[in-house]
Amino acid sequence: MKTTVLSFLFTLLFIQVGVAQQSNDAQSLIKLSQDKWQWMSDKDVDKLKDLFDDKSKFVHMSGTWKKEEELDIIKTGRIWYKKATVKDTAVEVFGNTAIVWNRITLDAIVSEQVAITEFTVTEVYQKNGDNWKLLDLTFSSVRDTHEIKH
């Protein structure tokens, strides 16, 4: 009887630790995603270079490209992500992989034209050691009434 009770208590403890870790990861990913938007706005390619995995992909309305091209686009201002207003965020953590969904209004300059667009942005991250690396960032054009289901 004592063994069963102790096993049950240890199981509960491990579940609580796992849930707390996932919650901590979710909070750190939300912060990291917000920082990423600021770094993109600031054209801080040094910080973004560290965040983006070497094999990362970026899916935009006009095409898909890899890390080096995305960094060049940001650095040269071909797309200037002036301001991303995040309206809603959802995070799911699956072991060392996580998906962050942001519903945003993006104020950008694209080919010297002002563009204000509603997007749901899907970001896929993988944890390497203590750090998260961005594997994929995909923009999906949506209506302002679009909701992320939590």
Image (tube, grey):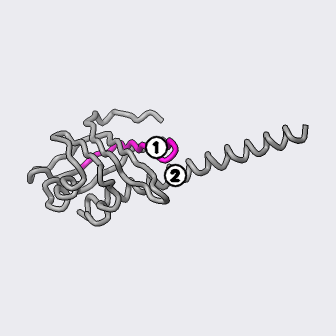
Q: Is residue 12 magenta?
A: no
Q: Quadrant of the N terminus?
A: top right
Locate residue 123, reporting x and y percent: 36, 45
Q: Please indicate whether residue 113 sits to the left or right of residue 91 in the image.
A: left
Graded by Cα atoms within 10 Å as few (under 14), some (14 to 19) or many (20 or more), the crowding at tag 1 reads many
Locate residue 150, reporting x and y percent: 48, 36
Q: Please indicate whether residue 141 sits to the left or right of residue 76 in the image.
A: right
Q: Nearer the viewer, residue 88 or 131?
A: 131
- As helix, strand or loop, the secondary structure at mark 2 comes to helix
Predominant secondary structure in magenta?
A: strand
Residue at image point 17% right, 58% down:
72
Graded by Cα atoms within 10 Å as few (under 14), some (14 to 19) or many (20 or more), the crowding at tag 2 reads some
**Cβ atoms under marks 2 and 1 closer than 8 Å:** yes
Locate residue 14, reporting x and y percent: 69, 46
Magenta span = 93-106
Q: Earlier in the sequence, mark 2 or mark 1?
A: 2
Give amino acid for label 1: Val
The residue indicated by pointer 1 is: 91
Give amino acid for label 2: Asp
The residue indicated by pointer 2 is: 25
